[in-house]
């Protein structure tokens, strides 16, 4: 038998938790489904956070715990399970979320907050050093590398732009690229080549990220010669793309050409009663604070939507 809620939020990152806070505070019976052992998404694995308003010095786990406690205060419920599908019956006001725990959850509205995973290098030492010198967010972590020598992996617009941003902090930024030329727009390349802090290592890939605890070097392989060298570095920033976690939607809502969910200013998708927030949506900036803002908007507008649906049901419409 299906369990009934007003709102089901899929994903327990900052966007999902903020949506839960706003929805539950408006007296919606709210459930958060999170597949991972810990809430917080990408935020949880960030070692230090110093750009979230009101928290000048905190960590990802600490900030996540504060979000979760705030949501629990207003009665948000949590279940560890992965959403496998959303069923929309055009003849019913209810949406049904089927989960990996074998349960089904009926609700009037759904907020998709499943995030996007940064593509990794897949090399030895990468997982062990995430949050300890390995990052995929220059805005989040750049300030921690003041006067350091760091490397950036990638050759597209984002990689080169993020590398130039990192020169505000680092003493030297080396782009490691598997080709012998960048893929970034020519205008971006010109700025990069003119920056005295920027350096380039062509035809190369990282084979291993090394360091006891924190990153202290990388092993780099030249793809043409096969030669492996060791390069000292205190940080590895990876910008080779992201993968939005939208496969379970099976094309049910409108996505852009990269798989991100398209929403309007109310965080609504093209399907009534389905909202989306955070890194999973088409947007220009992906930060903890912007995800939380998305979640607040979704919580507000989903609350209004649920109230309207209930009012229509009460009137027999």
Image (tube, rainbow, N blue to C red):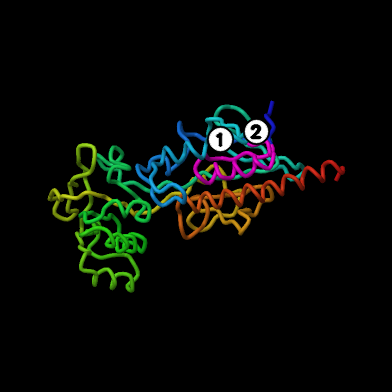
**Residue 308, magenta (yes or no):** no
The alpha-carbon separation of the residues under discs 2 and 1 comes to 10 Å
First in residue order: circle 2 vs circle 1: 1
Label drawn at residue 287: none
Q: Are marks 2 and 1 in contact (CB under 8 Å)?
A: yes
Q: Quadrant of residue 79?
A: top right
Could you classify mark 2 by the number of other residues whose Cα lies within 10 Å: few (under 14), some (14-19), or many (20 or more)? many
Quarter of the image with the N terminus is top right
**Residue 12, magenta (yes or no):** yes
> Which residue is the site of mark 2?
105
Q: Give left or right: position of 233 versus 51.
A: left
Is residue 242 shown above or below 89?
A: below
Could you classify mark 1 by the number of other residues whose Cα lies within 10 Å: few (under 14), some (14-19), or many (20 or more)? many
Please tell me whether mark 1 sits on a helix, a strand or a loop: strand
Q: Give left or right: position of 275 versus 50.
A: right
Task: Using the image as rendered, state which of residue 39 and residue 185 is in the foreground.
Answer: 39
Residue 183 coordinates in the image, percent (x, y): 32, 65
> Which residue is the site of mark 1?
33
Is residue 216 shown above or below 4?
A: below
Task: Using the image as rendered, state which of residue 36 and residue 303 is in the foreground.
Answer: 303
Find the magenta span and give its range: 6-30
Q: Give left or right: position of 67 versus 111.
A: left
Residue 6 coordinates in the image, percent (x, y): 69, 38
Quarter of the image with the C terminus is top right
Residue 32 coordinates in the image, percent (x, y): 57, 36
Task: Using the image as rendered, state which of residue 185 and residue 178 is in the foreground.
Answer: 185
The residue at 77%/48% (across/down) is: 308
Please tell me whether mark 2 sits on a helix, a strand or a loop: strand
Residue 315 coordinates in the image, percent (x, y): 87, 44
């Amino acid at each position: 038998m299906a369990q009934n809620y007003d709102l089901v939020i899929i994903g327990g990152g900052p966007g999902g938790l903020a949506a839960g806070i706003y929805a539950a505070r408006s007296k919606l019976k709210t459930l958060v489904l999170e597949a991972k052992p810990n809430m917080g998404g990408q935020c949880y694995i960030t070692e230090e956070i110093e750009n979230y308003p009101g928290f000048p010095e905190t960590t990802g786990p600490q900030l996540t715990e504060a979000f979760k406690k705030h949501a629990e205060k207003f009665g948000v419920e949590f279940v560890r399970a992965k959403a496998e599908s959303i069923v929309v019956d055009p003849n019913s006001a209810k949406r049904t979320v089927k989960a990996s725990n074998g349960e089904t959850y009926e609700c009037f509205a759904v907020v998709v907050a499943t995030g996007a995973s940064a593509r990794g290098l897949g090399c030895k030492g990468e997982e062990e050093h995430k949050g300890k010198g390995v990052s995929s967010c220059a805005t989040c972590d750049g300030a921690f590398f003041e006067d350091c020598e760091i490397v950036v992996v990638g050759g597209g617009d984002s990689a080169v732009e993020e590398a130039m941003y990192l020169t505000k902090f680092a003493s030297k930024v080396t782009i490691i690229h598997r080709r012998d030329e960048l893929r970034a727009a020519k205008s971006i390349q010109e700025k990069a080549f003119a920056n005295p802090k920027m350096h380039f290592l062509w035809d190369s890939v990282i084979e291993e990220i090394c360091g006891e605890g924190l990153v202290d070097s990388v092993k780099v392989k030249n793809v043409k010669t096969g030669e492996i060298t060791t390069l000292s570095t205190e940080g590895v920033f990876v910008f080779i793309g992201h993968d939005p976690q939208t496969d379970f939607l099976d094309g049910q809502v409108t996505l852009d050409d990269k798989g991100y969910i398209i929403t309007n200013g109310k965080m609504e998708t093209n399907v009534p009663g389905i909202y989306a927030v955070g890194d999973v949506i088409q947007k220009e900036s992906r930060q903890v604070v912007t995800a939380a803002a998305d979640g607040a908007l979704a919580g507000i507008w989903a609350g209004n939507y649920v109230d309207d649906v209930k009012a229509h049901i009460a009137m027999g419409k």
